Image: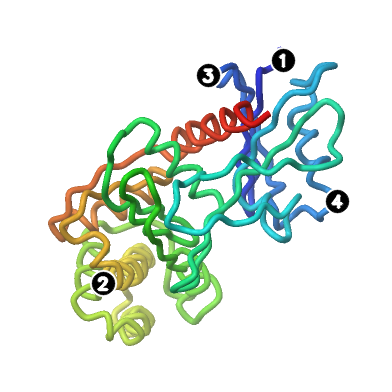
């Protein structure tokens, strides 16, 4: 089975590939060889380990997005400055590849004031907009580094990045809170914590230590503490992004579990939220990028 082209989502921790025939995925594979686990000379090897069986004698286009285009990636794909379409230029060609592939990397976006960058999310945004003509509003892309993106007339106007996911991982795994945060979840505790800090973001640091005190003095269970920690951090993020989401058309693109958590927090504040599947948006965006390479070939 030789695909027409190959779609690649190459993040910091994972590598995902799809064998594509037009718009349809014929097969897929993944590994844990994300950018952080691959040396600069190891990207092609990591990719070929997954796609070797799809290759023939004639070269096939490989279209990749994500951290593969970072300074520490396979090749540094220059950023495009906003305001601009999410993928304003054709993907950047990777030189010196195996003769069976022609590899391209989708460039990220940059913002000068305040300084900000994204890699990978621009492809999801392009995929989301591909099926929604004249969509204006705000897109939230939750993750380790959550993006809030203002979109108008098919252009990214501005965006902000929040390290909420990384802060959750650090606090729950490496701070004093690691002794109090456990497995499980409590929807009511999350909603109450998010609303509390959203209304009083200046209390965030105190609310965080309160999780440890509630464990020591009241025996609060780990599931409640986990939900509250998430609620406190997301509540602070929503307080900071209120100008983005208040009264705006709003979409969330991300993994289902995390998207649902953000959606519930926003819905409790009266926001109307549309959710979109991140994989579907990524593939649609990579299809758009593939078409760009064909038009410029």
Is the residue marked by circle 2 packed among few (<14), some (14-19), or many (20+) residues within 10 Å? some
Q: CA distance from mark 4 to mark 2?
A: 43 Å
- Which numbered disc, 1 or 4, marks the residue that appears first in the sequence? 1
Is the residue marked by circle 4 packed among few (<14), some (14-19), or many (20+) residues within 10 Å? few
Name the image quarter holding residue 148.
bottom left
Quadrant into which the C terminus falls: top right
Q: Residue at x 61, y 44 (%)?
A: 106
Q: Residue at x 38, y 81 (%)?
A: 212
- The residue that disc 1 covers is 2
Q: CA distance from mark 3 to mark 1?
A: 13 Å
Foreground residue among 182 and 228: 228
Q: CA distance from mark 2 to mark 1?
A: 49 Å
Image marks 3 and 1: residues in contact by CB distance under 8 Å:
no
Task: Using the image, tell me which numbered label, if any, was put on residue 239.
Answer: 2
Q: Is residue 15 above or below residue 297?
A: below
Quadrant into which the N terminus falls: top right
Q: CA distance from mark 4 to mark 3?
A: 31 Å
**Secondary structure under the numbered disc 3 in the rendered image:** strand
């Amino acid at each position: 089975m030789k695909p027409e082209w190959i779609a690649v989502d190459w993040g910091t921790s994972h590598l995902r590939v799809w064998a594509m025939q037009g718009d349809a995925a014929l097969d897929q594979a993944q590994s844990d060889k994300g950018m952080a686990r691959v040396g600069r000379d190891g990207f092609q090897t990591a990719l070929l380990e997954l796609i070797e069986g799809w290759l023939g004698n004639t070269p096939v286009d490989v279209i990749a997005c994500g951290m593969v285009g970072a300074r520490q990636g396979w090749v540094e794909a220059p950023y495009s400055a906003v305001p601009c379409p999410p993928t304003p230029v054709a993907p950047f060609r990777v030189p010196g590849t195996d003769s069976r592939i022609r590899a391209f990397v989708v460039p990220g976006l940059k913002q000068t004031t305040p300084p900000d960058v994204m890699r990978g999310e621009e492809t999801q945004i392009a995929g989301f907009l591909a099926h929604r003509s004249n969509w204006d509003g705000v897109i939230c892309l939750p993750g380790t580094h959550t993006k809030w993106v203002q979109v108008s007339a098919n252009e990214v106007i501005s965006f902000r990045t929040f390290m909420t996911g990384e802060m959750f991982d650090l606090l729950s795994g490496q701070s004093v809170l690691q002794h109090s945060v456990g497995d499980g979840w409590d929807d009511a505790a999350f909603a109450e914590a998010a609303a509390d800090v959203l209304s009083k973001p200046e209390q965030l640091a105190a609310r965080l230590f309160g999780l440890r005190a509630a464990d020591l003095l009241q025996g609060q269970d780990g599931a409640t503490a986990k939900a509250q920690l998430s609620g406190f951090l997301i509540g602070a993020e929503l307080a900071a992004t209120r100008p983005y989401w208040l009264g705006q058309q709003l979409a969330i693109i991300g993994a289902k579990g995390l998207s649902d958590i953000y959606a519930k927090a926003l819905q409790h504040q009266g926001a109307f939220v549309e959710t979109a599947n991140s994989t579907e948006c990524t593939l649609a965006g990579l299809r758009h990028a593939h078409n760009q390479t064909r038009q410029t070939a």
